[in-house]
Image (spheres, rainbow, N blue to C red):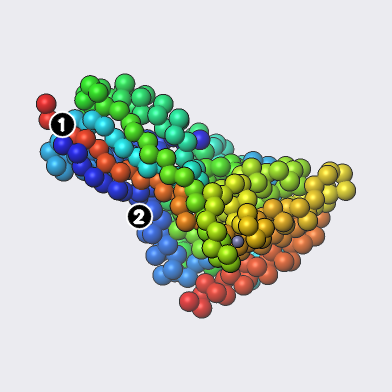
Amino acid sequence: MKVTLRTDVLTNNNKAAEFNRELFESTRTLVVNLMSSPGAGKTTLLEETVRALTEKYRIGVIEGDLATEMDADRIRAMGAKAVQINTHGGCHLDARMVAASLAEFDLEEIDILFIENVGNLVCPSGYDLGQNHKVAVLSVPEGNDKIPKYSQMFMRTELVLLNKIDLLPYLDFSVEEARKDLSEINPQSELLPLSARTREGLHEWFSWIEGAYLKCVQQ
Amino acid sequence: MHEMSLMGDILQLVQEDSSQKGIEKIGKVELIVGEISNAMPDALRMAFDLFREQNLHLFTENAELIIHLEEAEAECILCGTQYRPSQKIALCPNCQVPSGKVLKGETFQVLSYEGSNE
Ligand SMILES: Nc1nc2c(ncn2[C@@H]2O[C@H](COP(=O)(O)OP(=O)(O)O)[C@@H](O)[C@H]2O)c(=O)[nH]1
Ligand SMILES: [Mg+2]
Ligand SMILES: [Zn+2]
């Protein structure tokens, strides 16, 4: 007997993502899912973001890593509430893991929730977590070729933070070429060059967050 | 990659349905896998074989995984050209500007399965 299903393989993830999304909407929480390869600078960027915005917004952070509590500790040191998810070998966060960790937050008391995904340019992009925005971080030392090579990541993100531009003088990375490649993969996506180290360009990122927050609460 | 966990999801979907229908054993499972869906067919096949070996009682003897590949397809919103996208997914080969929209290739579905009570 043949049974036709035609069911999306990620159905259960998508249901959990919908559950998260409804919770975020009802509590007016802006949620940003940050994705990159390991070491691109997600945690450093979040440290700087918390430092700059914590007076104005109540910020929460979910830290996804294979193991350890190290990144959550770095965020807590900046004064924000952080919850660590350890995937124990899992290469991405899924919506069920996020749903489980939401129990540790009072979302009514959070304006902006950042989710730092597991460092990996392939797998995380396929998983809806219920976020408002998917943002990729790419860093200068990774090289220009990462945009076309990992095009499935960049076709699913609406903003790319090009981090570590303080290293541009020492490497052969071309910001122009990155812009062009990105526009040919995803014309709707923006590229913001910045440095979490020297803080150059961070203001544009903060403005982007504030714009997204306004849009989120006005809905 | 995470094809083992994807295969876990796939077989869970199949089993939820088959147990509702009172089906005891799973035969052929058919998937549709899009070229730009992030899932790798070879790794899925390996994962299926492994699952089967570890759960022989759930499968019929000739249980197999059939993968229907869905080619990626995009269409230019300016000139209407349909093309098979390269890495530069939005780049229309005719206009040479990023004006393409993905039509196909992102599907990742369980199409069907065969059940048996022998
Ligand atoms: N030169 C430079 N180094 C940076 C910058 N941002 C982060 N780093 C360094 O890159 C390394 C990895 O950063 P981390 O934030 O842990 O990356 P994650 O794995 O994406 O969370 C650390 O040694 C950071 O100090 C930057 O803008 N410039
Ligand atoms: Mg980190
Ligand atoms: Zn065209």
**In the image: residue A199, left or right of residue B67:** right
- In terms of secondary structure, where does tag 2 sit? helix
Residue A195 at least partly seen: no
Amino acid type assigned to the residue bearing label 1 in the image: Ser
Residue located at (21% from left, 35% from top) = B114
Q: Quadrant of the N terminus of chain A?
A: top left
Percent coordinates x, y for residue A144 in the rendering: 73, 46
Name the chain under label 1: B
According to the picture, the residue beneath numbered tag 1 turns out to be: B116
Taking the spot 49% from the left edge, 48% from the top edge, the residue there is B72
Residue A51's spot in the image, x, y percent? Answer: 69, 60
- Give neighbour class at mark 1: few <14, some 14-19, many 20+ (Cα, 10 Å): some
Label 2 crowd bin: few (<14), some (14–19), many (20+), radius 10 Å: some
Image quadrant assignment for residue B8: top left
Answer whether labels 1 and 2 touch (C-beta < 8 Å): no
Indicate yes or no: mark 1 CB to ligand 2 under 8 Å: no
Residue under the point 19% across and 30% down: B25
| Residue A56, x across and y down, in percent | 63, 71
Residue A196 lies, in percent from the top left, at: 75, 54
Q: Are discs 1 and 2 both within one chain?
A: no
Nearest the eye: B106 or A141 = B106
Is A197 situated above or below A92? below
Observer-nearest residue: B38 or A48?
B38
- Residue lying at 40% horizontally and 45% vertically, measured from the top left: B108
Can you tell which mark lies on residue A15? 2
Can you tell me whether the CB of the residue at mark 2 lies under 8 Å from the nearest atom of ligand 2?
no
* Left or right, B107 with reference to A148: left
Q: Amino acid at mark 2?
A: Lys
In the rendered view, would you say B65 is above or below A96? Answer: above
